[in-house]
Image: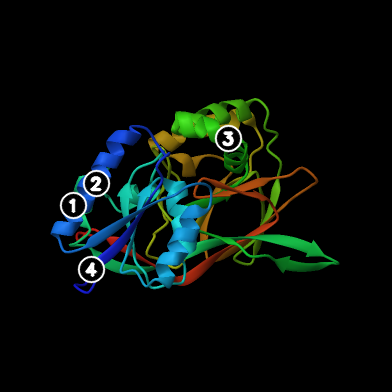
Amino acid sequence: MPHEIKDALLIYNPTSGSRRHRRFEEIEHGVRILKDAGIKVELAPTTGPETGTKIARQAVEQRRGMVIACGGDGTINEIVNGLARSQVPLAVLPAGTANILAKELEIPWDIPHAARLIPGGSIRRIALGIACPINRNGGSTIASEGRYFLSVAGAGPDGAIVNGVSHDLKKNAGIFAYWAEGFRQLFSYGFPEMRIRSGGKDRTATIIVVGRTVHYGGPFKITTGANLFEDSFEFLTNSRRSRLGYLACLPAMWLGTLRKKDGIETWKATETVCEPANSEPVYAQVDGEPVGPLPMAFRIVQDALSIVTPAAQ
């Protein structure tokens, strides 16, 4: 960690995850650890949706030395959207429902332990993904302002789950809210097809995973060829529409044999455009947050974010 970083803003979600009172005690412990290392930390709780983005933008305007995100994937996504294209580095203290970035960087799920790794860490510049909704206007194609994402995006069944999950249930049940919505979608989702244009090739699929990380969600690893430090995505699609075929993919994901299943295709590229193949909507998500229906473009934005990685990375 460069010696000139002497101050940090720690943005945390006071309502995410479980053990909330205990977690705040751990945050205070982490603040003391950083203070002992010469980094003065100010706390900034989020107060509702998108406030993490607003607070992070203010940190950029105030020229903070560093922003520390304490929360899950949704909190980190908000903060990333406030820091994108700035030079203010992002560090992570894992908390919340899930935290793909912490898994990817092998940061321990223990706030004081993770805090001890920050002063000795390295700052690395990485690319981000961006999801841009596409509006059709008089035959022309207009990509509207997008949402950045750090780890993983997608469209299809995962988008339907993320767009359908109850906010209150997620707040109270955490990761189990996604499992409950996934179980509900299992019996109602119609697996509508989408058209995908990427790398000079047209494809048809019922799901696309847009990976910047190996980790996906929970215990799963899907885009195992992705690399956070490369300026590209790894894409994975499934062209099958069978409900039983999707169920057969679950043990394959556990066993690491998903790529051997019929209908699965993977490739690397920096961009893809996805649109529904018919009138049935297909929903998308980024870092576990809803971003609405297709059509949508997913693109790499180079040199977009500075992150603090543990010294061994």
Q: Which mark is residue 32?
A: 1
Question: Where residue 271 appears, x then y in whole percent?
Answer: 57, 65
Name the residue located 45 percent from the left edge and 35 percent from the top edge.
252
Q: Which mark is residue 165?
A: 3
Q: Mark 4 sits on what residue?
A: 6
> Label 1 near label 2: C-beta < 8 Å?
yes
Q: Mark 1 is on which residue type?
A: Arg
Label 2 neighbour load within 10 Å: few <14, some 14-19, many 20+: some
Residue 233 visible somewhere in the drawing = no
Q: Secondary structure at mark 1?
A: helix
Q: Mark 4 is on which residue type?
A: Lys
Mark found first going from the N terminus, 4 or 2: 4
Q: Mark 2 sits on what residue?
A: 28
Rounded to the nearest whole Å, what is the CA distance between mark 3 and mark 1?
37 Å
In this rendering, the count of numbered labels is: 4
Q: Secondary structure at mark 3?
A: loop
Mark found first going from the N terminus, 3 or 4: 4
Rounded to the nearest whole Å, what is the CA distance between mark 3 and mark 4?
40 Å
